[in-house]
Every structure is written in C-alpha cells, then in structure tokens.
Image: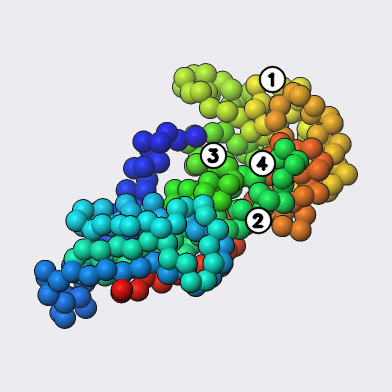
Amino acid sequence: MISKKQFNKEIDRIISNAIREDVGAGDHSSLACIPEDATGKAKLLVKDEGIIAGVDFARQVFEYVDPGLKMDIKIKDGTPVKHGDICFYVSGLSQSILKSERLVLNAMQRMSAIATKTSKYVKLLEGTGTKILDTRKTTPGIRAMEKWAVKIGGGENHRFALYDMVMLKDNHIDFCGGITKAIETTQKYLKDHRLDLKIIVEARNLQEIEEILKNKGVYRILIDNFNYEDTRKAVALIGDSCLTESSGGITLDTVRKYAECGVDYISSGALTHSVYNMDLSLKAV
C-alpha cells in the first residue's frame, strides 16, 4: 500500500485540481455581488440517511481556499446521520465559503454514499472473519478520495494502483503463457528490480488453484467468479498456504454466503462504482 505521505499528496492534488477546474480565473458570481471583506456563516445540512464521510476532506478544502475559514465540527466522519442533522458550521469570508461550496458538497455526497454502502457490507460480514475490500474500479482522478471513504465506512483498501502490488489476472497469465511462467517471471522481475511487492494470482477454476499452489511466494489467491460450492473447495484446497479472496459480481445479497465459504477477503468494485450520492447541502445561516 502507499504511504500516508503519498496518500496525502494525492488528496492535495485532488483539491488543487478541483479548485482549478471549478474556479478558474475567478468566481465571478460572488465577485460581482458580494463585497470582498463580507463575512458569513454556513452549515452542512444532511437531507438523507447513512454514514457521513468527507468532513475532514472539507476541512482540507477550506484550508486550501482560505486558511482564515473556521470550522465548528458537530459530527465526525464515520458517524450515522439522518435528515436534519448538521455536520458542521463554517465561518469566514463569504466569497471563500462560496468558492469552496461545490467541491465540498460534491466530495462529501460521493464519499458519504461510498461509506454508507461499505458499511452495509461490513455489517453483513459481522462474525465471519471476512473483510471487505475495494478495487481499482474508481472514478479517474479521485481514487484517493473514494478509497478514503471506504475506510471511513469500515472497509479495507486493496492495492492503491498498479505500482504498489502485483496482481496477475487472467490476461497477464494468458499473455505470459501460463500461471507458473507468470509467477516465475514476476518473481525474477521483482528480485532484479529490488522491489518488495506482494503477489496476488487470479484463479479461474480449481485446476488453476492447484497449479498456483505448486509455486512459492504467492501472497493471496483471487478466487474469481466461483460459485459457493467451488469456493468452499478452493478454500479447503488452499488451506494455510496463503490468503484467499473472492471476487466477481458479489452483491449485498450474496456477500454473506461467500464469506461463510471461509475466504479471508471479498473484493467489490460496487463499493465505489455503483453508489447514489447522499443528499447534502451547504446553507447560509
């Protein structure tokens, strides 16, 4: 996984690029009708139900736009919220509040939706020992923000990108010429380049799992698109040789049954690519 320092840099890039995109040469709507020195106060109002996420992201946005803006936080990230709750107040220059408004809302609405969905998966997995993972199926340019929301919702992050873990999927295996060859050439590559990266290998059937197990150094086997019966067989076959992960169209309706097959992890792209934004608004007080 990437370091905290790298992660924070990604968040900084998201904020700076979003402000560049949204404000550009200036917020002429505010510049035209609000005095430069006018001050005001606004509240973040919840008009929905779920898990709030992005309060700390909002703090970083306000700090970036205007260090003089002050937040009074009433509800922290990861807290269940309902219609009518107020997450925070922000006060300071009115122009700065308005300049920050859309980025704060866009981010918090999406982050809260992701955290809420993740929380549902986490609750369904209670008592099984299985953990829910996100994937790389994120919105281009805001991956760090979306993966942050998964953590707030109680889930865990998979690899951040292509550079912090090796995952040999079906196409890698087919292009390389087979499972064993893909694993062996990968291990040589990592050694030659002095890279300390974990290796995950995808299996499409029980026969591929048997071949993977003949090779040492595999961190986790991705049991992809297996039914329940074959997943249980795969877990029994793998035993303590390495960790296990189920993936492939697993939903809220099926996640518990896959967990009961005994896998260590379940990954779901739906945590980040199939959510409906939470209804929030930033209103002047």
Q: Nearer the viewer, mark 1 or mark 3?
A: 3
Farthest bottom residue in view: 33
Check disc 2 and report the residue beneath it: 120
Tell me if residue 194 comes above or below residue 117 in the rendering: above
Q: Which amino acid, by three-letter code, is at mark 1?
A: Lys
Q: Which amino acid, by three-letter code, is at mark 3?
A: Arg
| Lateral position of residue 185 relative to residue 37, left or right | right
The answer to whether mark 2 and mark 3 are in CB contact below 8 A is no
Of pointers 4 and 3, the one earlier in the residue sequence: 4
Check disc 1 and report the residue beneath it: 216
- Colour mapping used in the image: rainbow
Q: Residue at x 42, y 69 (%)?
A: 45
Check disc 3 and report the residue beneath it: 159
- Location of residue 17 in the rendering, given as x and y in whole percent from the top left corner: 30, 56
Query: Could one spot residue 198 in this view of the protein?
Result: yes
Of pointers 2 and 3, the one earlier in the residue sequence: 2
